[in-house]
Amino acid sequence: MSKTQIGVIGLGKMGAGLARQAAEKGYPVVGMDLHPRPDLETENLHVVSSIEELAQRLHRPRKVFLYIPAGVAVDGLIEQLQPHLEEGDIIVDGGNSYWGDSIRRAARLKENGLYFIDCGTSGGPGGARTGACYMVGGEEAAVSQLKDFFVETAVPNGFLHTGAAGTGHYVKLVHNGIEFGMLQAIGEGMGMLTHFREKLDISAILGLWNNGSVVRSWLVELMKKMYDEEAGFNVPSYIEDTGEVNWLVADALHMEVPIPVITQSVMQLFTSRDQDPTWAKAIAMMRHGFGGHPYGEDKGIQRERQYGRVGEYEMPPETGERAEKE
């Protein structure tokens, strides 16, 4: 049986990786990007320069994957696509769009006889190239047409039809929030390792942890890989992100669901960007005002902080009466 033909608009890191993987597995692919990509051309992968040409080359029902940044650009691209599509054609948003936007887009396209699938894609560029993890929302009639494609371009057991439109991007959003929390915990652990009284072999420790320990994971594996490549933590401390987890924090407030770890991980990212923090200056000014505390570092106070406490806190001895009650 011949494999379904797909179109891919947006041949960046994710789109190009998926297009290449699909073509290598025998799927006919028509790609399009704002920038020429002749380097992608193969027997199964053809790159065109316009939406009109892409639509003309695709067999009906057309399946068009969008791998572009989330936001108004997605709505704009859908508007450009619609005149070239026909009833029963399918648009798949593989980016990190907000789930509420996906529900809206699916409803609008359905009015015009078109299907919309929101496909949360995890695994990064490497996953797109060799095997991704798909969280797919949308109508069964549309998803079933692409099920074989999703299964074959995913890692084993890396495809799930999560439910109606919006569920794929919602599940991916929660996934990204969990990712932030895990990154923060690993990062804090690295800080503790570097501040021990003796020099520790961090690379060896990370390698050890990925062999049978409770925290073994791809992120720990990546931490070791990057630590070795950079010969330590020799990179800027500024952390950039595209803001999706901010949406999850806002959702949690509306849903009244406590997510303190994920929320704090977002705040810590902001802290990494604050090279001249006004909040710290404000606190220093108030402390100076009420207690005469100095501005800046003070060796005497630093010593007091380290040596002001003589002993550890001791629990009071249990009385016979208390022990008897327990």
Image (cartoon, rainbow, N blue to C red):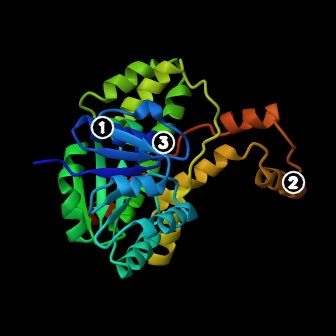
- Give the labeled residue for mark 2: 285
Q: Amino acid at mark 2?
A: Met
Rendered residue at 45%/30% (across/down):
39
Rendered residue at 51%/73% (across/down):
253
Within the image, what quadrant is residue 170 found in?
Answer: bottom left
Q: What crowding class fits label 2: few (fewer than 14 Cα within 10 Å), some (14-19), or many (20 or more)? A: some
| Callout 3 secondary element | loop
Look at the image and tell me whether residue 207 can be seen.
yes
- Give the labeled residue for mark 1: 21
| Callout 1 secondary element | helix
Where residue 281 sits in the image (x, y, percent)? 82, 51
* Tag in front: 1 or 2: 1
Q: Amino acid at mark 1?
A: Gln
Rendered residue at 54%/26% (across/down):
194
- Label 1, label 2: how far apart the Cα atoms are: 58 Å
Where residue 220 sits in the image (x, y, percent)? 38, 33
Which of the two discs, 3 and 1, labels the residue nearer the N terminus?
3
Q: Is residue 98 left or right of residue 142?
A: right
- Give the labeled residue for mark 3: 12
Within the image, what quadrant is residue 291 found in?
Answer: bottom right
Question: Looking at this view, is 323 or 20 the one in front?
Answer: 20
